[in-house]
Amino acid sequence: MSVFSVCLRVLKKNLPTILIYFFVFVMVSSIITVMTAPSEPGEFEKTKIPMAIFAQENTPLVEGLKESLGQQAYFVETEDNREKLQEALFFRRVHYILRIPAGFTEAFIQGNPIMLERTSIPGSTSAIYIDLRIDRYLETLRLYTAAMPETGIREKVNFVLSDLAVETKVEIAGSENRTNDTGILKYYFNFLAYTIMFAIIFGVSAILLVFNDTDIKRRNLCSPLSSNKISLQCFLACALFALANWVVLAALSAVFGFDEIASPSTWLYLINSLVFTICISGLAFFIGNLTKSREVVTAVANIITLGTSFLSGVFVPQEILGENVLRIASFMPTYWYVRANGRIAGLADLNIQSLSDVFISIAIQLAFGAAFLIAALVIGKRRQVTAE
Amino acid sequence: MFFHVFKYRLKILLQDKGTMFWTLMFPILLATFFYMAFGQLGALENFNPIDTAIVDTAGDEAFMSLVETLSTGEQRLFNVKTTSMDEALRLLSEEEVKGIIETGETLSLTVSQGGISQSILKTFIDSYSQTVSSINRIAAQNPESLQTAMAILAEDLNFLEELPISRANPDSTIIYFYSLIAMTCLFGGFMGMTEVNAVQANLSYHAARMNFAPVHKLKMFLSGISAALIIQFTKILLVLAYLVFVLSIDFGDRIGLIILTIFLCTVLGISFGGFITSLVKGGEGLKTGILIAATNVSSFLGGMMQVEIKYTIDTYVPILSRINPASLITDAFYALYYFDTYNRFIENISGMIILTIIFSAATYIVVRRRKYVSI
């Protein structure tokens, strides 16, 4: 096993660099996992939009409006400064800014209301959502103003608020089958694709760069060890390295999904990521056989990892990506890996239909892995012929 | 002599494939990935009529005609399919519709998950029941004005007017592209590093030879830096052209100032590389590593991986955005694009100039007058 141990020594030498990347990736993936994972409520809750209100008068009408909006929005305290507001809107800290001019209440009661000024994200759904609520409140109030002119404004506002509190019950279809999984593991495992891909391509190429050096190759060819055995040991070392990466990352998943260890979907995630690891090892073997210098490896590893991750839905969910992008992405194993993760997360209960979809995705990854490996071996063989 | 050195530095830099890749090809590829991945992100916020299934169990004509009005025309709220319950549930599970409204004694809503479209559906059917509640109250308390109330209901008044806040569309995905330019500028630091290496006799054989030449060292250094500047400036303009003309990223219309900013950040990027090279004592590998790490951290803080990070830092640790080169560059483009005043842009530009002076001074202190008896 001399070749095998040399491979391990090469890896050991490259360990500091690999560890730095690994550590950074794990940090970033933890931050992103925590930031993006939504909590799925078992009961329907209305979406709340961040908004800012600047009222130049304080009347029962205005108070009532705020209270009524409170069900659909939360109010962001912010300074009434044009640039600050522009910036808050740009970065979506507020989606909607409402200004109530002085004298609005008076004019409203008189029956010829002045306009409220709103600033929203043009054409957005959130704007329509808040508009609906404001219209609802003011129209109902106008109804009472016209129909019950004797009643005081405060009482009318109370009528409106109690009317607006009438709610329909919403049913969530299929909620009885749902497990209590938070869905956080999906995000963790999706991001794992990025980390593991970079680490494996980088590490495996480091080994192959050494062995593919023409002089060393010539030297190895006249050793009593057959070239097949050399390749095999080399491949074993690469596989061991890949597996080690997977074990570390899989163990880390327990940090995020400790409560879900017993859940069957956790095991499916693990199987899926293991298959992906195998597939990427094949890809890394292929790249390692193609490239000749360290710089090229860094460039290729970056481009392939970033490119496939962006297009396959590691950073941006697949549902948001355009159809054309997904069509291109389906030629990449990462796409199938992320797709399987999505299906696993969507498994309300373990029925055959969705499970078979997961397994098809996994099988496609295996096919990719095999194709990469074969391509790598073919190239390796041809290289060997030219070296001789 | 200045032009002689300049010419050869130009040739050498143009043949440096590694730097060419990181400062030209890599940004263009990354921009393409950004474009493909974030292309739909802006459209996600835009309102599209909500696909809704309606199961008219009770044969509620009044409600159906209201739905009809709301689902026709350009400004419609819904796209409606009237079907049976089984079919509706199938559509819901296949995500063809966002929710199912069933008529009956009361209206009911079935959805598969929460979300803003579902909330709008709920707001809509709530409002239907709420109006019923209002009318009942009026009928009970003041029955003679029921007629007036009905007339009011039929009217459609608008209480809101839009007050646009900026000259530009608040599309935050452009920050990714702005910070990409910032990253490219900082990668230009490789060229600053190459230039320092080319004149410091202890850093390369090439420099040791150059130091024999009867040329003033500063002159030699400046001609090298000028070559680097011209190449890097051209490359960033190419990246900009790719973003603007191929990917149609909106940079606003202040073209002169945009090009000025690009020039200033080119200088900043190159001096940044010189600064790191002079600061770090160690081999070229270590210097490259630190330069890459510094660029990545700087771009990360400038919002290249997550736009929210830029806002968070701007708001809570403003001092960090004032000294972080990538934040300054990104923010300068953002200020030009989004704000109508120039205050913020001028702040950023001043910050960039101050940083450039500091970086250049540090580089100068290291590079000047270093002589070696033997190496």
Image: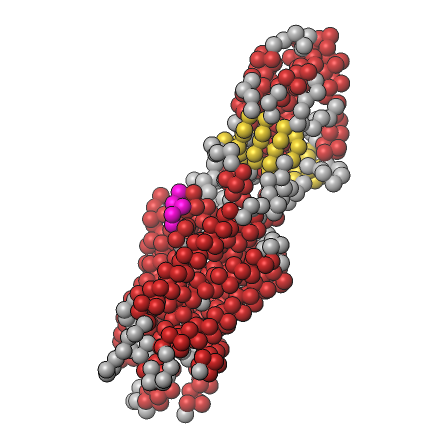
Horizontally, residue B226 falls left or right of residue A220, namely right
Given residues B165 and A169, the one toward you in this image is: B165
Q: Is residue A320 above or below residue B294?
A: above
**Residue sitting farthest toward the left:** B373
**Residue segment shown in magenta:** B316-320
Quarter of the image where one finds residue A95: top right
Q: Position of residue B191 (x, y in %)?
A: 42, 71
Q: Is residue A255 magenta?
A: no
- Residue beneath the point at 60% across and 58% down: B255
Q: Position of residue A133 (x, y in %)?
A: 61, 28
Q: Is residue B148 above or below residue A286?
A: above
Quarter of the image where one finds residue A275: bottom left
Q: Quadrant of the C terminus of chain A?
A: bottom left
Quarter of the image where one finds residue A193: bottom left
Q: Quadrant of the N terminus of chain A?
A: bottom left
Say if residue B234 shows up in the picture.
yes
Given residues A369 and A81, the one toward you in this image is: A81
Q: Position of residue B186 (x, y in %)?
A: 44, 63
- Residue beneath the point at 62% across and 20% down: A103
Given residues A125 and A244, the one toward you in this image is: A125
Given residues A74 and B92, the one toward you in this image is: A74
Decide whether the magenta segment is chiefly helix, strand or loop. helix
- Residue beneath the point at 36% across and 77% down: B217
Say if residue A333 shows up in the picture.
no
